[in-house]
């Protein structure tokens, strides 16, 4: 990385959003842990540094701090929320515990403009999320704006700017303009982040790194692993060996579709492993969701390990790791294992003795999709909804058997088909059907039935951290219900999930 913007992570839920906003401007940005050494930061030759928000208090004994010398290198600094309090604390100002805090929307008034606030309305709405507040700004700092508290300060001579609110979220009306002001007017950052350049650069790097060795990749059919596979194949051709494990818990006809889309169309070298019976045997009688996840994840590792040892001359293990996964695993909040168990082939044992190859680790999801389209992967494949690693194993509540899997596959297929047919698929973020371990009485023709209840779930989100249920027309939901009940033997009742996240999660297990 050269001359991009570095974001130091103090635990804010919005870190990825800051980086995305900057990349959308055509400038590279990178999120690093707050305790990255100053030497490592300077080695990246950044145009500017952003200190993110975070849940800590600067007055706490275990407060997350940075080297004070960071502010003396002449590199522009923007402190956001906790970053403002940290800057104040380190440079001699005073931060106190707030009387009530500010959360959500607040009215911001500019008292004295500066380069960061150039072109911003005197009054605007901003998004707050803090309890501590700045009581006294450091010596030499101007107070540039207020809400109920001091909300913007700066020392323009030292190129240090701070705001108590979050300019990166859409709720801050003129936040995008503030970020532009910082990136271009203050940092003079080069606008050279392009995905086409990224593909060429990455292909060259893969060729150089791999040489004539073989690469193994666990292909899931999802967006990340598929784009990684096509990108690596572009670099080294048949030196890439993909392994596709059919767990028996995939979408309807998923194995056949993957072999056709990526084997026949892209000529990827794919070995299909039919492990359906193995997984079903391991899952028999198991109903606890976490136990199901562990069984599926562990068995996947065992199957993958067995198959990888059959491939001679393989030195590298490729994974579809993307930047949010990297940030989660290095964040001050701790490793991501609990958040995302079984991500692609995540958790493969170290004793497999492969060198990791992660060509997408610098990209966000929307960038991965764009790379996929640049590589010629059809639009509908790179815009597929996320599908969990444990698959239908966590969409069948309670114990699992082949009959339930077949029922759910058919119901889910109808729902997805209707979303496409009504041009709704890409208007929602994740949609699927859940099969409940509940049977109820129904009537079909002249006969009484006693069959399963299914729940249709669809959520809209920008970051998957919060989500709202999709507000479909009643006619659409009625059609879904009629089709599933009439066409899928084993279901006689449909419910629609209208809960949001939080308090619910998007998946049911």
Image (cartoon, rainbow, N blue to C red):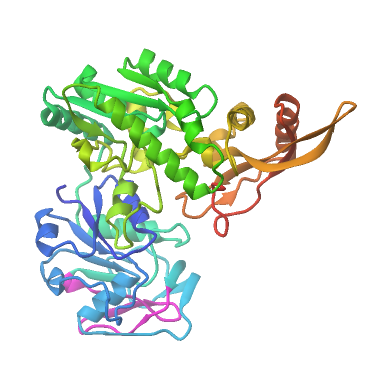
Residue at image point 33% right, 25% down? 243
Give the vertical position of 373 relative to 7 (above or below). Answer: above
Nearer to me, 389 or 417: 389
Give the vertical position of 243 relative to 95 (above or below). Answer: above
User: Can residue 384 be seen at all in this image of the molecule?
Assistant: no
Image spot of residue 22 (x, y percent)? 30, 51
Image spot of residue 7 (x, y percent)? 26, 59
Nearer to me, 162 or 54: 54
Magenta residues (range)? 130-158
- Is 188 left or right of 414, judged from the image as shown? left
Residue at image point 20% right, 20% down? 239
Q: Residue furthest top?
A: 264
User: Can residue 104 be seen at all in this image of the molecule?
Assistant: yes
Q: Is residue 138 magenta?
A: yes
- Is 458 left or right of 42, judged from the image as shown? right
Residue at image point 9% right, 55% down? 43
- Is 413 left or right of 247, judged from the image as shown? right
Residue at image point 65% right, 47% down? 497
Q: Quadrant of residue 434?
A: top right
Image spot of residue 145 (x, y percent)? 37, 76
Give the vertical position of 91 relative to 11 (above or below). Answer: below
Image spot of residue 287 (x, y percent)? 56, 45
Q: Is residue 209 magenta?
A: no
Q: Residue furthest right?
A: 446
Nearer to me, 494 or 360: 494
Give the vertical position of 404 relative to 27 (above or below). Answer: above
């Amino acid at each position: 990385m050269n001359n991009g913007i570095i974001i130091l992570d103090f635990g804010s839920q919005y870190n990825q959003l800051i980086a995305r906003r900057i990349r959308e401007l055509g400038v590279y940005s990178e999120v690093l842990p707050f305790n990255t050494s100053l030497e490592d930061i300077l080695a990246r030759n950044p145009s500017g540094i952003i200190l993110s928000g975070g849940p800590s208090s600067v007055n706490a004994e275990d407060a997350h701090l940075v080297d004070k010398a960071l502010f003396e290198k002449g590199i522009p600094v923007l402190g956001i929320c906790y970053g403002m309090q940290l800057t104040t604390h380190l440079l001699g100002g005073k931060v106190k515990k707030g009387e009530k805090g500010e959360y959500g929307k607040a009215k911001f008034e500019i008292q004295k403009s500066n380069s960061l606030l150039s072109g911003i309305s005197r009054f605007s709405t901003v998004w707050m999320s803090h309890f501590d507040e700045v009581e006294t700004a450091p010596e030499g700092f101007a107070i540039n704006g207020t809400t109920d508290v001091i909300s913007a300060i700066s020392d323009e001579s030292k190129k240090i700017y701070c705001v108590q609110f979050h300019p990166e979220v859409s709720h801050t009306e003129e936040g995008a303009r503030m970020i532009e002001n910082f990136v271009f007017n203050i940092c003079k950052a080069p606008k050279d982040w392009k995905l086409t350049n990224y593909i060429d650069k990455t292909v060259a790097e893969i060729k150089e790194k791999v040489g004539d060795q073989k690469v193994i990749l666990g292909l899931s059919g999802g967006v990340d692993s598929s784009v990684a596979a096509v990108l690596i194949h572009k670099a080294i051709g048949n030196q890439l060996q993909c392994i596709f494990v059919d767990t028996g818990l995939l979408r309807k006809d998923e194995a056949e579709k993957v072999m056709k889309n990526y084997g026949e169309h892209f000529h990827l070298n794919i070995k299909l492993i039919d492990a359906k019976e193995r997984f079903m045997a391991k899952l028999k009688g198991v109903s606890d969701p976490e136990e199901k996840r562990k069984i599926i994840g562990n068995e996947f590792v065992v199957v993958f390990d067995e198959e990888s040892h059959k491939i001679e001359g393989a030195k590298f293990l490729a994974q579809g790791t993307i930047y949010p996964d990297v940030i989660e695993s290095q964040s001050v909040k701790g490793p991501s294992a609990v958040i995302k168990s079984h991500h692609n082939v995540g958790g493969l044992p170290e004793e497999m003795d492969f060198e990791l190859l992660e060509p997408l680790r610098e990209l966000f999801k929307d960038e991965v999709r764009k790379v996929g389209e640049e590589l010629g992967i059809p639009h509908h494949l790179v815009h597929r909804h996320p599908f969990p690693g444990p698959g239908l194993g966590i969409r069948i509540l309670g114990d699992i058997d082949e009959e339930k899997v077949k029922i759910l596959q058919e119901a889910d297929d109808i729902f997805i088909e209707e979303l496409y047919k009504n041009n709704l698929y890409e208007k929602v973020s994740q949609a699927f059907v859940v099969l409940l371990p509940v049977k109820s009485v129904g009537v079909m023709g002249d006969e009484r039935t006693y069959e399963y209840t299914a729940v249709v779930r669809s959520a809209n989100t920008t970051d998957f951290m919060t989500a709202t249920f999709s507000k479909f027309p009643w006619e659409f939901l009625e059609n879904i219900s009629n089709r599933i009940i009439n066409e899928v033997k084993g279901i006689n009742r449909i419910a629609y999930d209208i809960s949001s996240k939080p308090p619910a999660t998007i998946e049911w297990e």
